[in-house]
Image (cartoon, helix red, strand yellow):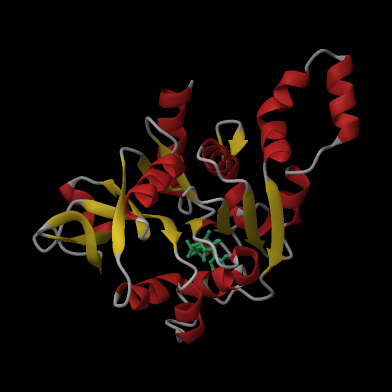
Amino acid sequence: MKVRKLVIPVAGLGTRFLPVTKAVPKAMMPILDKPVIQYTLESAIKSGITDVCIILNHNQDLIKDYFSHNLELERKLIEEGKSKVLDSLNYIIDNLNITYIYQEEPLGSGHAIMLAKDFVGKEPFMVMYGDGFFLGKYPICMDLQKAYTMYDANIIGASEVELQEVNKYGMLILDEHDSDRILGVVEKPSLRETPSLLASNGTYILKPSIFKELEKIKKTGGEYLFTDALFRLMRKEEFYVGRTDNTFYDIGNMNGYLKANNAAYKFLK
Ligand code: UTP
C-alpha cells in the first residue's frame, strides 16, 4: 500500500543559521531558484503523496503565502507570455492538499510532529524535515515508499556516507542475518566504532503507533525529541532501512547550505 500522507515540521527557530532565519524560515532558504521545501514537495508528489501537513510557527506565514495562487501575478505573467516561470510552483499548489498547523512554542521536533496526530489518523505516514535537501537518481520519497511496500513496517531513510563522516550522523545498527532490518541507531559514533556506513537521513515512514510513544517521551535538553519516541518504538516494532542513493544535505548550517547549492548547480543545471 502506498503512503498518502506526509508531515513536515518546520517550526524550529533555526538558531544555527541566524540572523537570516529571524525573517526567512529554514525551509524557505533557496537552493538555486526554489525554496528547499519545494524540492521535498516535488519528491512527495512523484511518490504518490496527496496530503501534506506542515507544522510551522507564527513567524512563518510566508510559507503559506508561497504555496497559494497569486492571481494578479499570474495574470500579469500570462499577458507577458511568461507564465511558465511559475509552472513548478503551481504544480505543487494544484496537486497537494496542504494543511497548516501552528506550533505555539518551539518545544522540539517530537512536540511538533505530535501536533499532526489528528491529520494522520490511523494510516502510516511519511516524515521529512524542513531543512533536508536530497539529490539522487530517484526522488527520495519514492525510495521510502518502495521500502514500505516491501516490508509493511516502520522505515528509516538512510544514505551511505564516507567513513570520515560517520561521527556527524546517527548510524544504523543492522541485523547480521537481514541487512535491511534495523536493530538500533548509534548517535555520532567514532570512526572505529561505527556499526555501518548507513546514516539516518531524517526521513521516515511510520505506523501511527508512534503517537503513543510521542505521548510518553520526556524533555531532553529542554525539548521533546522525535528520536526519543523512535527509539521507544524500536523496542516494540520492526524497523527497516529505506535505502536510497540520494546524497543528503542538512541546509540548517552554512556549510551544508553551500554544499547543497553547489551540488544542485552541478546536478540540476
Ligand atoms: P532542528 O533541530 O534541525 O531545527 O530540527 P532547529 O531547532 O530549527 O535548528 P537549530 O538547531 O535551532 O539551528 C529538525 C526539524 O524539526 C523542526 C525544525 O524546523 C526542523 O525542520 N522543529 C524543531 C520544529 O518544527 N519544532 C521545534 O520545536 C523544533
Report whether residue 169 is seen.
no
Q: Is residue 77 left or right of residue 263?
A: right
Residue shown at 61% from the left, 67% from the top: 116
Report whether residue 162 is seen.
yes
Q: Is residue 40 left or right of residue 253?
A: right
Residue shown at 69% from the left, 74% from the top: 104
Q: Is residue 261 left or right of residue 63?
A: left
Q: Compared to 176, does 30 lie above or below?
A: above
Q: Compared to 227, does 97 lie above or below?
A: above
Q: x%, y% of residue 121?
A: 60, 67
Q: x%, y% of residue 148?
A: 38, 51
Q: Is residue 121 left or right of residue 230?
A: right
Q: Compared to 109, does 17 lie above or below?
A: above
Q: x%, y% of residue 15?
A: 53, 64
Q: Nearer the viewer, residue 269 or 50?
A: 50
Residue shown at 45% from the left, 53% from the top: 253
Q: Residue furthest front?
A: 1
Residue shown at 18% from the left, 50% from the top: 164
Q: Nearer the viewer, residue 65 or 230?
A: 230
Q: Residue furthest top?
A: 81
Q: Compared to 122, does 203 lie above or below?
A: above
Q: x%, y% of residue 13?
A: 59, 65
Quadrant of residue 162 within the rendered picture? top left
Q: How many marks?
A: 0
Q: Nearer the viewer, residue 188 or 23?
A: 188
